[in-house]
Image (cartoon, rainbow, N blue to C red):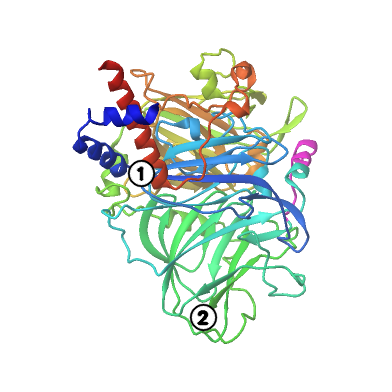
């Protein structure tokens, strides 16, 4: 009956209107569709078989390669034996915290279930990564890269590279993530030193037989002499800052976490947990041998670090022999200001366009009035109610069974409180679900004060912030005189050195509930996080509406449908899916016209 009625009603629409409908849909921002299965697979990163988390059967997972403003639909099937969520590190999810993939915004995907993420990479470019956000699962893998390319109408501030290479560097334990969780919960010794450092899920090249056992697979990067490559480096590790360098090669920094930078030469770069950088590297060396690519630990006790650094191989196509000799030297371990001065040297390229044609520097953040100030202090783990916990301003975050965003949507009282203190309170530490009450379109100054003995990295979902200052000692009001108010780089993750502070400025223009956390997995797991609630008081519907496929949990569990009733997308191509959507829309329109004729 449907086809004859459709044919009959087609005469009600002119051919030109049909063409316009299809053309308009196809001219809209493109869609890409993926089906990913997350499961345990067996790998031997350090030469011993162990269980890791793979995405679509590979570790690390596939690279999500898209262009500014594209719409992304990823159906994730959880084949693990525990709940799972993916978060998209640095993707701003404009007005759509439903897709953020952290415990405050999403119910976990139960074992055996699927859930479809749907979001747009709105007005962004650059290098990012995704990873599991629950239960220390990133320590077992489950991560992969995100590349957001410029639209063709936006100029890139450097020549087109001859290739694009993604490298994941990470500290690694042979213990499972479940065993590491138990270690954190049962004692105050932390996790102890890791068992090694990986490149793209592979162990070190055997540069030293006394340190590296035989038979460990290692990463080889194949290149052509004379060509220039864009190398995107992500520290996806647990808690170790890593110094990245390529033997005898200069690295030109061009981008970090969605911001083009002033192009400066570096022989090495300290990359802290959760951070991402893009370098241009020209293959301009003699090809008499291969070259080492190194990721070595920083800010660690040399007497306890007995494992090998991460070592990959850069192989020219005309190379005449293997890499040999000692690894290129890292920065001096006792020069405490080296890494800080290097971080201060990273500047925003204010003359370059990014996702939009206007220069990045047209956002004159130094001239905006600050509306809220938070000085957030962290301390080493301490006993709170008999449990070892980490705190921010004396509060150790407890994730409620009902996500904050769902509780807000359904007006469920008692799930969280908008009472996170803007200063450290001189009182006993406590465990609580305390959230920062952000001012919509306010301009917040956050100072992270690190009273711990290790480097901490802090990340804010949903926003890029301006890193305006850092120094050793205690931050005071006078510290503002040292701020960079012109070209401090905009990014989503910043490091805070031990016994030091880092100041950021952030425009809270993205409605939603957004995770503010340490990227160090041990501190995060033990409670070092909070959320910022950003509500548009003039328009409650400023955010994307509740997704049709939302998973319910906690006090809202009775609303949950059976898995079989929940719709998810298949792996159809983007063009096929768009045409399908358009045809469905046309059929619905025609049937509606038929009902009124």
Q: Quadrant of residue 77?
A: top right
Say which of 368 and 458 sits in front. 458
Determine whether the residue tagged by mark 1 lies in a helix, strand or loop. loop
Say which of 417 and 544 sits in front. 544
| Residues in magenta, as a range | 181-194
- Residue 524's spot in the image, x, y percent? 63, 38
Inspect the magenta stretch and tell me whether residue 186 lies in it.
yes
- Residue 196's spot in the image, x, y percent? 70, 60
Quadrant assignment for the C terminus: top left
Say which of 334 and 374 sits in front. 374
**Residue at 76% across, 64% down:** 47
Q: Which residue carries the number 1 mark? A: 69
Quadrant assignment for the N terminus: top left
**Residue at 67% across, 71% down:** 205
Q: Which residue carries the number 2 mark? A: 317
User: In the current view of this chain or complex, which residue is farthest to the right?
Assistant: 186
Asked if the residue at tag 2 contacts the one at tag 1, i.e. Cβ–Cβ closer than 8 Å, the answer is: no
- Residue 204's spot in the image, x, y percent? 67, 67
Say which of 238 and 466 sits in front. 238
Is residue 282 toward the left or the right of residue 63 in the image? left
Is residue 350 toward the left or the right of residue 101 in the image? left
The residue carrying pointer 2 sits among few (fewer than 14), some (14 to 19) or many (20 or more) residues within 10 Å by Cα, namely: few
Is residue 286 toward the left or the right of residue 396 in the image? left
Q: Quadrant of residue 86?
A: top right
- Residue 422's spot in the image, x, y percent? 50, 26
């Amino acid at each position: 009956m449907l086809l004859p009625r459709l044919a009959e009603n087609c005469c009600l629409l002119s051919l030109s209107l049909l063409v316009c409908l299809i053309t308009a849909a196809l001219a809209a921002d493109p869609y890409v569709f993926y089906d990913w299965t997350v499961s345990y697979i067996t790998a031997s990163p350090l030469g011993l078989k162990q269980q890791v988390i793979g995405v679509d059967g590979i570790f690390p997972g596939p690279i999500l390669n898209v262009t500014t403003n594209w719409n992304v639909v990823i159906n994730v099937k959880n084949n693990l034996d525990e709940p799972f969520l993916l978060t998209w590190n640095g993707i701003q999810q404009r007005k759509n915290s439903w897709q953020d993939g952290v415990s405050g915004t999403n119910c976990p995907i139960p074992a055996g279930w699927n859930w479809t993420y749907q979001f747009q990479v709105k007005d962004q470019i650059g290098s990012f990564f995704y990873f599991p956000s629950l239960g220390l699962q990133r320590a077992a893998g489950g991560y992969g890269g995100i590349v957001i390319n410029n639209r063709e109408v936006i100029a890139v501030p450097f020549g087109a590279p001859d290739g694009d290479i993604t490298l994941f560097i990470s500290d690694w334990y042979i213990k499972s993530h479940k065993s590491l969780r138990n270690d954190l919960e049962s004692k105050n010794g932390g996790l102890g030193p890791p068992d090694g450092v990986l490149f793209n899920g592979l162990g070190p090249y055997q540069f030293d037989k006394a340190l590296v056992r035989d038979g460990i697979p290692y990463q080889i990067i194949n290149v052509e002499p004379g060509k220039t490559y864009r190398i995107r480096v992500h520290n996806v590790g647990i808690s170790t800052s890593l110094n990245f360098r390529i033997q005898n090669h200069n690295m030109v920094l061009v981008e970090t976490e969605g911001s083009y930078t002033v192009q400066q030469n570096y022989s090495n770069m300290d990359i802290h947990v959760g951070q991402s950088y893009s370098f241009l590297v020209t293959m301009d060396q003699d090809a008499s041998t291969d070259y080492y690519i190194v990721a070595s630990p920083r800010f660690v006790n040399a007497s306890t670090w007995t494992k090998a650094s991460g070592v990959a191989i850069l192989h020219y196509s005309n190379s005449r022999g293997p890499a040999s000799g000692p690894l290129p030297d890292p920065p001096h371990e006792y020069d405490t200001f080296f890494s800080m001065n290097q971080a201060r040297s990273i500047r925003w390229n204010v003359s370059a366009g990014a996702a939009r044609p206007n220069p990045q520097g047209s956002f004159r953040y130094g001239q905006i009035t600050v509306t809220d100030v938070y000085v957030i202090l962290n301390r080493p783990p301490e006993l709170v109610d008999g449990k070892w916990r980490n705190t921010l301003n004396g509060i150790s975050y407890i994730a409620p069974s009902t996500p904050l965003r769902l509780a807000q949507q359904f007006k469920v009282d008692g799930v969280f409180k908008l009472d996170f203190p803007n200063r450290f309170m001189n009182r006993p530490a406590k465990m609580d679900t305390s959230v920062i009450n952000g001012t919509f379109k306010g301009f917040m100054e956050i100072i992270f004060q690190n009273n711990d003995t290790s480097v901490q990295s802090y990340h804010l979902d949903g926003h890029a912030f301006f890193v305006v200052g850092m120094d050793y000692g205690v931050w005071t009001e006078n510290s503002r005189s040292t701020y960079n108010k012109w070209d401090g780089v905009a990014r989503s993750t910043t490091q805070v050195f031990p016994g030091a502070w880092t100041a950021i400025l952030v425009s809270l223009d993205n409605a939603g509930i957004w995770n503010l956390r340490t990227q160090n997995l041990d501190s995060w797991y033990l409670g070092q996080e909070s959320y910022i609630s950003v509500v548009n008081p003039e328009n409650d519907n400023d955010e994307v509406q509740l997704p049709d496929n939302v998973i319910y949990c906690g006090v809202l569990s009775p609303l949950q449908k059976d898995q079989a009733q929940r719709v998810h997308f298949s792996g159809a191509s983007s063009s096929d899916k768009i045409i399908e959507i358009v045809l469905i829309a046309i059929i619905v329109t025609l049937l509606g016209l038929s009902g009124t004729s």
